[in-house]
Image: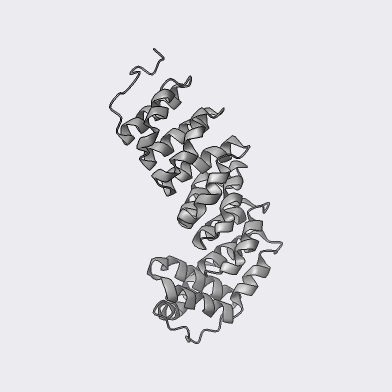
Amino acid sequence: GERRRLAAEARLRPGALALLAGDTGTPLNLTTHDAAVLVGLLDRYRSRIRGASADRITEFFEQRGVIDRELRALASRRAWRRATAAFSLGSMGAGRAAPALIDALQDRNRNVRVSAARSLGNLAAVGAVEPLVLAFARRSIPQLVAGQALLSIGTASLPALRRLASDSDPEARAFALELIGLAGDAEDASHVLPHLRDGSAEVRAKAARALGRLGAENATAELAAALYDRIGFVRAVVARSLGAVGDRDPGPQDGRLE
């Protein structure tokens, strides 16, 4: 219960702080419950963990068999245990768990899928980019969760996102274009421009927004032409993006075609 967790936190906090300071020789004998509490403490202090220190913490859990134990727990019959394992593997920095976590994106339980997505972002698992986008497109995980995970992966996600911008699923195309706008740079405009003529209005709007975020000045002419899109909300996004890239001709002002 809660009292047991709080007591374990108080007992383990000195060891957690020692680990953050790089002392992986801390003599901690971890039960399954204690390991989960320690992982939670370290996750709370994540902003303090960088570089070699993070690697030492992963090694600490590796040497004590905790990572292997959590990998086995991904196959538990209990959904809460699978979700806890998926969460813990990311907090421990267990990079070798990425394939198993990608598989967990198809778990029948939503909490497990969300925990797996979060951990894949924490691990900056490049191989998870396409599965994360497609899981969002299938509505298996929320957009916020998928987006945060993909942005955590960063620019390494761009090659896969560029491919996904041409996926057969319009939801996947739209989401990929939105993320390219957030993670890419002006050179990505050439991958985005063709989608101003996509058959999906949502995709056209995401393409226009991405071009504005990318500051793609070479897209001005195409964006100006898109001011005459047949869908009002697309025209509105295009107008804002034109302003962002510096065009001074606002085009139609009343949202209607002239």
Between 104 and 156, the one nearer to me in the picture: 156
Farthest residue, direction top: 258
> Which colour scheme appears in the figure?
one colour
**Where 117 sits versus 195, above or below?**
below
Between 190 and 95, the one nearer to me in the picture: 190
Q: Residue at position x 41%, y 68% from top? A: 45
**Where 257 sits versus 42, above or below?**
above
- Quadrant of the snapshot with the N terminus: bottom right
Image quadrant assignment for residue 189 = top left
Q: Residue at position x 42%, y 67% from top? A: 46
Measured as percent of width and height from the top left, residue 219 is found at 40, 33
Farthest residue, direction left: 248
Residue 116 in sight in this render: no
Measured as percent of width and height from the top left, residue 22 is found at 42, 81
- Quadrant of the snapshot with the C terminus: top left
Image quadrant assignment for residue 102 = bottom right
Image quadrant assignment for residue 209 = top left
Q: Is residue 171 left or right of residue 21?
A: right
Q: Residue at position x 66%, y 67% from top? A: 73
**Number of dots carrying numbers:** 0
Q: Residue at position x 46%, y 22% from top? A: 229
Q: Is residue 169 left or right of residue 57?
A: right
Residue 9 in sight in this render: yes
Measured as percent of width and height from the top left, residue 234 is found at 45, 26
**Where 240 sits versus 149, above or below?**
above
